[in-house]
Image: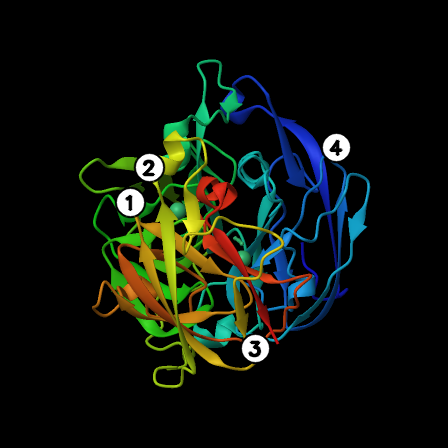
């Protein structure tokens, strides 16, 4: 769905029914289709968006990774009732990136995302040829939404979290790529760009190619790196995106796998020499220049991602940030517009993927050391193993009525209270 000529975007949340892989059909929901939404192509400038709600329950639509003011951000305060529409003005001025959109309806986010209310956005500046990057959509530029889903024996997709599932996040027993199980990606004998989104509720991936061919990381959540970085394994936690180049010029039928040690297949590739390979060598340099914000911070804050066993057993949830479970009426932080802050984040019990709305940030440290290669560029979501420090400049305003969120992107954790909100003024 290309918005560049019209400057308009209409998304309609639509009920549907999907028979995944020929199994029993599951009631699903998507944007403009039965499951997930279209890949939306955008460029910098003004975009008039409309989100219509054709479902029988309220939703919101958040632009995860777009830098827009709080009132257009689609957080939990911006509910769209059944039959209603929401018209955010998206004034976009940021580096090209792969970002995404999804519902953020508090109380319902895990189910609503799980059953399909999410999609990918390509924010482009039309300069990929000059960068030497593949950009033919669906040919040498593939968008891959990674989701694990749970299926029962009839092939119906189910969401029935137990207390343990909420503690660890809900995991599936089958991989879907763009809503398809057992799919094969057919690629030309050349360099192929994979835009990976972890759209799972809770699962982390540690991706690698089964024939050990490297993945060359070219972009993280918020834009390009200065140069490709060759990786044997790529970590991707819920909410994160990564763009990698893979060289298929030698052909073959490799499988992208996850979790070395207890490996399972994520996506099968097939190479087809009749497809034209437009790009046959890796670019040496890219024009990404993640700004070094170190030393410019005005404020340091602590963010503790809390999970309490005791609270769980009492039925109180136990999910909180800095000891306080999410409250839509409470503002947790007040940030000065244009200022740089350092946030020191600490995970308890498990590694939590931490996301901040309204900014892109740099990862300064990870468990006291330098960040992994995946975390060296612009980020908006980062897996916090034990501790991490991030630096961000807060350039977009958000008021008390329509604040920005910060939260764990394990949707079961966020929904159970591991979320806070802040203003920028
Ligand atoms: Cu991707 Cu607050 O969300
Ligand atoms: Cu977000
Ligand atoms: Cu979490």
Question: Residue tagged by mark 1?
Answer: 349
Front residue (pair 217, 126):
217
Question: Residue tagged by mark 3?
Answer: 395
Secondary structure beneath label 2? helix
Image-quadrant location for residue 36:
top right
The vertical placement of 313 against 41, above or below, is above
Mark 3: give few (<14), some (14-19) or many (20+) Cα within 10 Å. Answer: some
Front tag of 4 and 1? 1
Distance CA(mark 4)–CA(mark 1): 37 Å
| Mark 2 / mark 1, whichever is N-terminal | 2
| Mark 4 / mark 3, whichever is N-terminal | 4
Distance CA(mark 1)–CA(mark 3): 33 Å
Of all residues shown, which one is farthest toward the right? 83
Question: Residue tagged by mark 2?
Answer: 309
Front residue (pair 197, 294):
294
Question: Are the two marked residues, 2 and 1, in contact with CB atoms closer than 8 angstroms?
Answer: yes
Secondary structure beneath label 4? loop
Name the residue: 27% across, 47% down.
Answer: 209
Compared across the picture, whether 147 is left or right of 26 comes to left
């Amino acid at each position: 769905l290309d918005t560049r000529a019209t400057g308009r975007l209409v998304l309609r949340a639509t009920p549907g029914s999907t028979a995944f892989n020929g199994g029993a059909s599951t009631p699903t929901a998507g944007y403009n289709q039965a499951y997930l939404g279209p890949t939306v192509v955008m460029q910098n400038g003004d975009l008039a968006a409309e989100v219509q709600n054709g479902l029988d329950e309220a939703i919101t639509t958040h632009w995860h990774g777009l830098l827009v003011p709080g009132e257009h951000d689609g957080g939990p305060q911006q509910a769209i009732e059944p039959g209603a529409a929401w018209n955010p003005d998206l004034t976009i001025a940021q580096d090209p990136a792969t970002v995404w959109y999804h519902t953020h309806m508090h109380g319902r986010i895990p189910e609503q995302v799980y059953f399909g209310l999410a999609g990918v956005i390509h924010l482009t500046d039309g300069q990929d040829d000059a960068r030497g990057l593949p950009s033919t959509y669906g040919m040498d530029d593939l968008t891959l939404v990674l989701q694990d889903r749970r299926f029962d024996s009839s092939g119906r997709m189910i969401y029935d979290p137990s207390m343990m599932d909420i503690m660890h996040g809900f995991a599936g027993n089958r991989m879907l790529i763009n809503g398809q199980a057992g799919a094969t990606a057919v690629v030309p004998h050349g360099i192929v760009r994979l835009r990976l989104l972890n759209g799972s509720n809770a699962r982390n991936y540690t991706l690698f190619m089964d024939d050990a061919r490297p993945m060359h990381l070219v972009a993280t959540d918020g834009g390009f790196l200065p140069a490709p970085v060759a990786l044997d394994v790529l970590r991707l936690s819920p909410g994160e995106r990564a763009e990698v180049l893979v060289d298929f010029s030698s052909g073959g039928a490799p499988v992208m796998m996850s979790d070395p040690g207890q490996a399972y297949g994520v996506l099968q590739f097939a190479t087809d020499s009749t497809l034209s390979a437009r790009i046959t060598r890796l670019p040496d340099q890219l024009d990404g220049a993640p700004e070094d914000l170190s030393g410019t911070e005005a404020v340091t804050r602590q963010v503790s991602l809390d999970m309490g066993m005791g609270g769980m057993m009492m039925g109180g949830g136990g999910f909180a940030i800095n000891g306080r479970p999410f409250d839509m009426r409470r503002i947790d932080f007040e940030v000065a517009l244009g200022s740089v802050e350092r946030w020191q984040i600490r995970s308890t019990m498990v590694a939590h993927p931490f996301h901040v709305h309204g900014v892109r940030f740099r990862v300064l440290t990870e468990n006291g050391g330098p960040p992994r290669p995946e975390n060296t560029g612009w980020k908006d979501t980062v897996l916090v193993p034990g501790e991490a420090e991030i630096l961000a400049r807060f350039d977009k305003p958000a008021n008390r009525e329509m604040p920005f969120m910060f939260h764990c992107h394990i949707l079961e954790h966020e929904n159970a209270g591991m979320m806070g909100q802040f203003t920028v003024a």
